Amino acid sequence: MARFLTNAQVNECVSLEDVLPAVEAMMDNHGSGEAANLTRRRIATPGGYLAVMGGAIMHDGVFGVKTFTNTRNGYSFQVSLYDGDSGELLLYTQANRLGQLRTGATTAVAIKHLANDEAATVGIIGTGNQAGDQLRALSLVRQVSEVKAFSRNADNREAFASRMTEDLGFPVAAAPSNEDAVAGCDVVIAIASTQTPVVQGEWLSDGATVIGAGPTLSRFREVDDSTLVRANRRFVDSMEQAPLECGDISAAVDLGLVQWSQFHELRHVVAGTIPGRASSDEIVYCKLMGTGLADVAAAKVVWERAEELGIGMVMDW
C-alpha cells in the first residue's frame, strides 16, 4: 500500500527537529559506504527543464527518486520512496515543503560539524522562501545570539528580520548591505538567487564558516574568488555534482586559484574520517547543492510519521 501526501500534509507530519537527525544519520552512513547518491541531472526544454535525482540508503532499507520541473509557472517537486527489498512504492509526495526542510537540515548538519562550538553571530544573504528554515535549523545546533540579514529589497529584509525575531526569540536585524551582514560574523549563509557574488573573502573574519546554499546552476556565483582562496578547508555535499552546479568553484578552478582535489565531501566529516577544522581561526567553506540522498532520508521520516498518524491517502498501488 502506498501513501500519497500533499505539501500541507508533509508539514503536519514532520518538523526540522525530525528531519535534521535523519539527514545527519544519512551522511554518517554515506560516509561509511552504506548509501549511494544519484547525482542530479537536468533535461532542458524550450519552456524550462526537468530534473531527476535520488539515492539508496542501505541501512534504512529504502531508495527513492526526486523529480522536479521549473517552467514559467515556477517549481513543482515530487519524491517517490520505495522499499529497498520488495521495490514496493511506499510514499509519493509533493516535495516543495520537504525540500525546504531538507535544505535547512543539511545546512545545520554542516554548521554542526564545521563551525566553531562557540559560533553565535550569523550573517545571512537572502531572505526568500528558504531563508527562514536556514535560521531555524541553525538554532538547533548552535546558541545563536545575533543575526544580520540582507537582501536587495529593503522592505523584504525588514519584514524578514521582524518576522524571524518574533519566531526565533533572538535578534535578527536587517543589514544595510551584504558587507554589513557578513562582517564580524562567525557563520555566513548565502542563500540568494544571484549570478554575481554576494560574499567577498576580504569581509570574512578569521574562524568564519561560510555556507553556500543557494543556486545550483553553473552560471550562478555566491562567493568571490578570494573567499575560496582564503578558505583553509573546502567542502561540498557531492563532488560529482559540483563541477556541474557550482559556478563560483568552477570559475576559481578555471583560473587556477584552487583545485578540485582541495575539496572534500561533507559526509566524510560527519562520518569522522576527516576533520572539519583543525583550529578555531581557520576559515571553512562549504557549498551545499542538495542531494537526492538527503531527499530520500527526509522522505523516509515523513513516511514513518504519516503511517503513525494516519495522514494522507492510501492506495493499493
Image: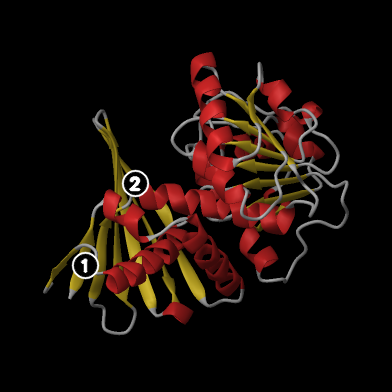
Q: Is residue 150 above or below residue 43?
A: above
Q: Secondary structure at mark 2?
A: helix
Q: Is 160 left, or right, of 261 in this rendering? A: left
Q: Secondary structure at mark 1?
A: strand
Q: Is residue 214 visible?
A: no
Type of amino acid under label 2: Asn
Residue 99 position, x and y percent, is 41, 50
Residue 257 position, x and y percent, is 75, 37
Q: Is residue 158 above or below residue 232?
A: above
Mark 2–mark 1 distance (CA, rounded to whole Å): 17 Å
Q: How many marks?
A: 2
Quadrant location, the N terminus: bottom left
Between 85 and 126, which is closer to the camera in this rendering? 126
Q: Is residue 181 visible?
A: yes
Q: Which mark is residue 96?
A: 2
Q: Earlier in the sequence, mark 2 or mark 1?
A: 1
Q: Is residue 136 above or below residue 276?
A: above
Q: Is residue 175 above or below residue 65?
A: above
Residue situated furthest left in the rendering: 316
Residue 70: image quadrant is top left
Residue 204 position, x and y percent, is 79, 33
Residue placed under numbered mark 1 in the picture: 3
